[in-house]
Image (spheres, rainbow, N blue to C red):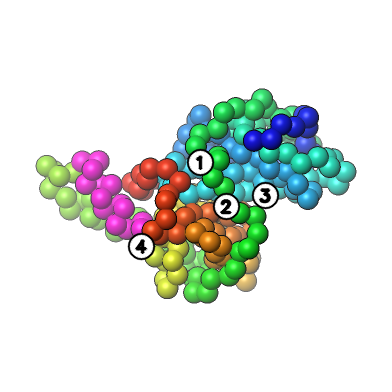
């Protein structure tokens, strides 16, 4: 991470502040000790987090107020401390002290070179697929003999379900589940720009509320995978 003298940032408006705070709150729900990596440039701040149950990166971008900061920034901080620092009434926040991030913070997807991948269903169908997968998991879990109803067997079933590709795309279903869990697939206007993009070994599910990045099948993952539905 590069050093920086930037001490505070001002988001473009209170809506940006509320959305960023909600995103951080969802990350903390999964891991109270979560860290996030912030990158500032071109009038926006990108916040990268890793909800631990999905082996993906969740990315929330927020616009900065014009003239609030011209310096570039790349730093890892506590998600909880960042959430506490955000003033949702003004959109201002002081940067928490930098922390030593977990391994995933050193492996981010590239900024450019993304190309659209066809075949992604619309948001409503994506939400239906998640509901169907959760229902299937519960049915198969309930059907397990008591002697086999343990974490290893549940993870095996979950891994089978959540590793399935979405429609005719290479995107694993767990990436869509992650998007829903962090609020990126909540109801949105019809014809909202939801797309699947690819560059190199990375796939990215892009929605108006944020993106989920995941390594394509057959490439090294971000960290170990836990797949029991939440």
The quadrant the N terminus occupies is top right
Q: What element carries label 3?
A: strand
- Circle on res. 164: 4
Which label's residue is closer to the chain start, 4 or 3? 3
Q: Position of residue 217 (x, y in %)?
A: 40, 59
* Side of 31 relative to 229 (left or right): right
Circle 3: is it few (<14), some (14-19), or many (20+) Cα within 10 Å?
many
Q: Is mark 4 on a helix, strand or loop?
A: loop
Q: Name the residue under label 1.
A: 104
* Side of 118 relative to 52 (left or right): right
Task: Look at the image and give the residue range highlighted in magenta.
Answer: 150-163
The quadrant the C terminus occupies is top left
Which label's residue is closer to the chain start, 2 or 4? 2
Circle 2: is it few (<14), some (14-19), or many (20+) Cα within 10 Å?
some
Q: Does the magenta stretch include residue 152?
A: yes
At 42% from the left edge and 51% from the top edge, which residue is drawn? 220
Q: In this view, does 149 lie above or below 124?
A: above
Choose mark 3 or mark 2, whichever is in front: 2
* Side of 163 relative to 36 (left or right): left
Q: Is residue 175 above or below residue 196?
A: above
At 53% from the left edge and 61% from the top edge, which residue is drawn? 200
Inter-mark Cα distance, 4 to 3: 28 Å
Which label's residue is closer to the chain start, 3 or 2? 3
Which label's residue is closer to the chain start, 1 or 2? 1
Q: Name the residue under label 2.
A: 109
- Circle on res. 61: 3
Q: What element carries label 1?
A: helix
Q: Is residue 169 magenta?
A: no
Q: What element carries label 2?
A: loop
| Predominant SS of the magenta segment | helix
Task: Say whether marks 1 and 4 touch (CB < 8 Å).
Answer: no
Q: Choose between 214 and 135: the one closer to the eye.
A: 214
């Amino acid at each position: 991470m590069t050093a920086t003298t930037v001490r505070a940032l001002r988001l473009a408006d209170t809506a940006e502040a509320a959305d960023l705070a909600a995103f951080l709150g969802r990350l903390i729900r999964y891991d109270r000790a979560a860290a996030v990596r912030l990158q500032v440039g071109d009038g926006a701040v990108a916040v990268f987090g890793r909800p631990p149950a999905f082996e993906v990166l969740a990315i929330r971008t927020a616009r900065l107020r014009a003239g609030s900061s011209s310096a570039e920034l790349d730093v890892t901080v506590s998600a909880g401390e960042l959430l506490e620092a955000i003033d949702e009434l003004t959109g201002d926040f002081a940067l928490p002290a930098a922390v030593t991030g977990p391994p995933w913070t050193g492996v981010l997807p590239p900024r450019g070179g993304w190309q659209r991948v066809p075949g992604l269903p619309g948001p409503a169908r994506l939400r239906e697929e998640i509901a169907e997968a959760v229902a299937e998991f519960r049915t198969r879990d309930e059907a397990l003999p008591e002697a086999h109803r343990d974490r290893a067997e549940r993870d095996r079933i979950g891994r089978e379900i959540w590793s399935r590709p979405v429609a005719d795309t290479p995107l694993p279903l767990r990436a869509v589940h992650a998007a829903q869990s962090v609020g990126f697939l909540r109801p949105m206007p019809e014809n909202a720009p939801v797309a699947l993009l690819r560059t190199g070994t990375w796939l990215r599910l892009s929605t108006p509320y944020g993106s989920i990045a995941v390594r394509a099948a057959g490439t090294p993952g971000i960290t170990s995978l836990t797949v029991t539905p939440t």
